[in-house]
Image (spheres, helix red, strand yellow):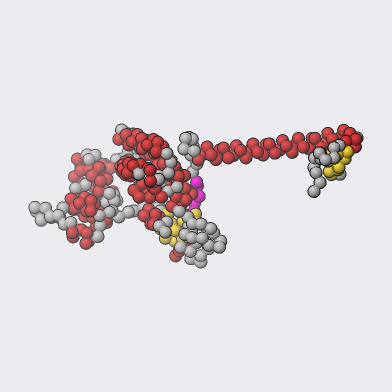
Amino acid sequence: MPFLGQDWRSPGQNWVKTEDGWKKTTLEENNKVSMESFCKVKEEECFNKENLLISLGYEMSAKKRRKDLMNNNTKAPYFHREKWIYVHKGSTKERHGYCTLGEAFNRLDFCSAIKDTRRFNYVVRLLELIAKSQLPSLSGVAQKNYMNILERVVQKVLDDQQNVRPIKELLQTLYVSLCGLVQDMGKSVLVGNINMWVYRMENILQWQQQLDNIQINRPTCTGMTLTDLPASLQLSIMDRLSDGRDLVSLGQVCPELGVLTEDRLLWKKLCHYHFTDRQIRRRLMVSDKGHLEWKKMYFKLSRCYPHREQYSDTLHFCTHCHILFWKDHPCTANNPENCTMSLSPQDFINLFNF
């Protein structure tokens, strides 16, 4: 292979780039190279070096932006906005590896989901289930993404002044779980430094204090209010409430609504909606007059059995394509409707138990 530079064993010889290509010349021939050709080569080399430096600069700046976006200290954390992901539970010839709960939580578009009123309660319930038992199974990036999404949820509640109670319960559940996990930090239960998690726990306490001090502003409405409606319409509206605590809060607005919220039929429908007949028979409570105490039975049953979950919009899973998605996905089945199943928050977590 020829030397591209000056050879120490034969002084005076050198390789020079000309219009016709590289040529091996002696020192005397090298001095005869025209100045025009030399300048042209220099200009091309300078131009190539400049383009190389510019491309390297762009690449380095892009890497820095990606690193800053993933950094927890930045003001604008990075969120994935994928509408669907492929869930594979093993390696095949076409795909290598498998999809984990942390990967699915990172890649799915939860940032836009918390802005959607129909999906908000679904995401909150999913965050609560992850806080109870699945937080150690998440990767470091997924745990950071979890806290960033939680911060956005809290900020949305503070701005909208709605759904305060579920977020308080979520923060309390997460704080209790972290208190137990931080004690086992030497067993590598959580990813990251202990000081970082202590700082996050302090943020949770701060969010709880902000939610406790929230002041619900009375809307300035000059039109018809709930109390102006007939009693039959008021009962019809109360019948749409699926949580007994909301019914109790509504009854504290004024004495007239308080009387309506004590309607036995409302509490009877709530009991039959959330619990089975067998569960109700085990917790029967009869008053002195011989009537069933449906309101007391509801809260007693709530302490013993879980409520029926109801969501306006959920994640879906296609059994044909093995794709997890929010709304639509490119299905190849002949009847996509028959292959699609809605997932509750617990079903979403059970999907990755393998």
Overall secondary structure of the magenta stretch?
A: loop
Residue 344, x across and y down, in percent: 37, 55
User: Does 82 appear in magenta?
Assistant: yes
| Picture mark count | 0
Q: Is residue 294 above or below residue 165?
A: below
Residue stretch in magenta: 80-84
Residue 71, x across and y down, in percent: 49, 38
The quarter of the picture where the C terminus appears is bottom left
Q: Is residue 287 above or below residue 41?
A: below
Residue 202, x across and y down, in percent: 36, 35
From the viewer's perspective, tell me whether residue 28 is left or right of residue 185: right
- Residue at the image point whose x is 22% and y is 59% from the top: 279
From the viewer's perspective, tell me whether residue 210 is left or right of residue 261: right
User: Does 291 appear in magenta?
Assistant: no
Q: Tell me where residue 32 sits by quadrant.
A: top right
- Residue at the image point whose x is 46% and y is 38% from the top: 72
